[in-house]
Image (spheres, rainbow, N blue to C red):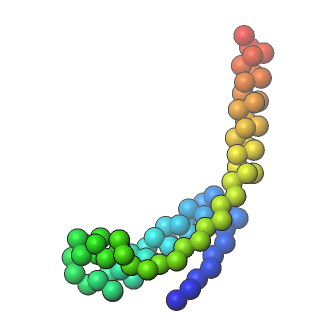
Amino acid sequence: MEAQWSAETAQTALNLLTAAQERIESALKVASPGGTLDRLRAAETAPVRLSITLDVSDLDRIGNDLHAFNAQVSKEND
């Protein structure tokens, strides 16, 4: 089964990453019904394709702007 998801906010992206991890773990439980150790070993060789495009440039810009603002305010208060 192939799925494609997209997110526009940091929280949605984090939720999708969690959902993807849970989906992989669920499939491993079905494919390797043994104990946790069996699933961990199976995970090392289980074929899964995952592609992630991550663009945090807007978030980085916000952080950089905030840092610059705080530095300017700090400089003015000295």
Q: How many marks?
A: 0
Residue 17, image x, y percentages: 53, 66
Residue 41, image x, y percentages: 28, 72
Q: Is residue 13 above or below residue 20?
A: above
Q: Is residue 49 above or below residue 1?
A: above
In this picture, residue 16 sits left or right of residue 32:
right
Can residue 12 be seen in this snapshot?
no
Q: Residue at x 45, y 70 (%)?
A: 21
Q: Residue at x 43, y 80 (%)?
A: 47
Q: In terms of image quadrants, where is residue 55? A: bottom right
Residue farthest to the top?
Answer: 78
Residue farthest to the bottom?
Answer: 1
Q: In terms of image quadrants, where is residue 50? A: bottom right
Q: Nearer the viewer, residue 47 or 14?
A: 47
In this picture, residue 22 sits left or right of residue 10:
left
Residue 54, image x, y percentages: 65, 61
Q: Is residue 59 above or below residue 63?
A: below
Residue 73, image x, y percentages: 75, 22
Q: Residue at x 75, y 44 (%)?
A: 61
Q: Is residue 16 above or below residue 32?
A: above
Q: The C terminus appears in which quarter of the rendering?
A: top right
In this picture, residue 62 sits left or right of residue 16:
right
Q: Residue at x 72, y 24 (%)?
A: 71
Can residue 44 be seen in this snapshot?
yes
Q: Nearer the viewer, residue 13 or 43?
A: 43
